[in-house]
Image (cartoon, grey):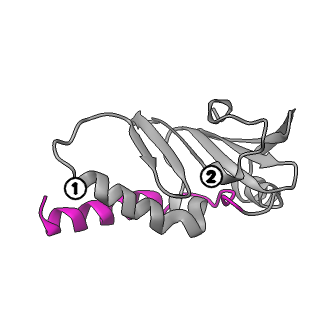
Amino acid sequence: MGTWVQTMLVIMLIHLTAGTPVWAVLGQAKASVEKDRAAMGGQVQSKLAPGYSVETITVVGMTIKEYVSLDGTVFAVTWKGTGVPNLRLLFDAYFDEYLDALTELQNKKPRLRRPLMLKTENLVIERSGHARNMWGRAFIPSHLPAMVSPKDIQ
């Protein structure tokens, strides 16, 4: 794939993810959940699970689940709805690592049409869907509470 095509793909990715509200930040404090709810005008519902809680924010067209460990750190985020949240804000310090892995994956041949699955040194990301039905999840494996499996993050 030529440099021009790579550049255009990165520009499109940034453009597509730039216009959505702020979400919780991976690796940051739980306090961001209330900020997210207020910014989106959504409703929050909390659910306790062994070793963590799930803060679900529901807004028109999207449901965001923020997984928070007992120490108050957001270790995973999932989304489902009509679009993709702003991944630069969602991943914060992990965004460049995500972008590098995405670029590397796009340069591999043959390219197959399938859900995106990336695993970097510090982050696991899965994304898929089609127009108006997008879903994804991202988590920090090193921040998973002892009793939590990646299968629990849905």
Q: CA distance from mark 1 to mark 2?
A: 25 Å
Give x and y (percent) for residue 25: 67, 60
Residue found 16% across the figure and 42% down from its top: 110
Work out which quarter of the rendered image holds the N terminus and state it: bottom left
Q: Label for residue 59?
A: none
Residue type highlighted by circle 2: Ile
Helix, strand or loop at mark 2: loop
Q: Secondary structure at mark 1?
A: helix
Residue 24 appears at what percent x and percent y? Answer: 69, 57
- Please identify the quarter of the rendering in which residue 50 is found: top right
Magenta stretch bounds: 1-27
Q: Which residue is mark 2?
A: 140
- Please tell me which of labels 1 and 2 falls first in the chain: 1
Residues 132 and 8: in front is: 8
Q: Find residue 153 and report its horizontal and vertical position in percent.
A: 65, 35
Q: Is residue 137 left or right of residue 97?
A: right
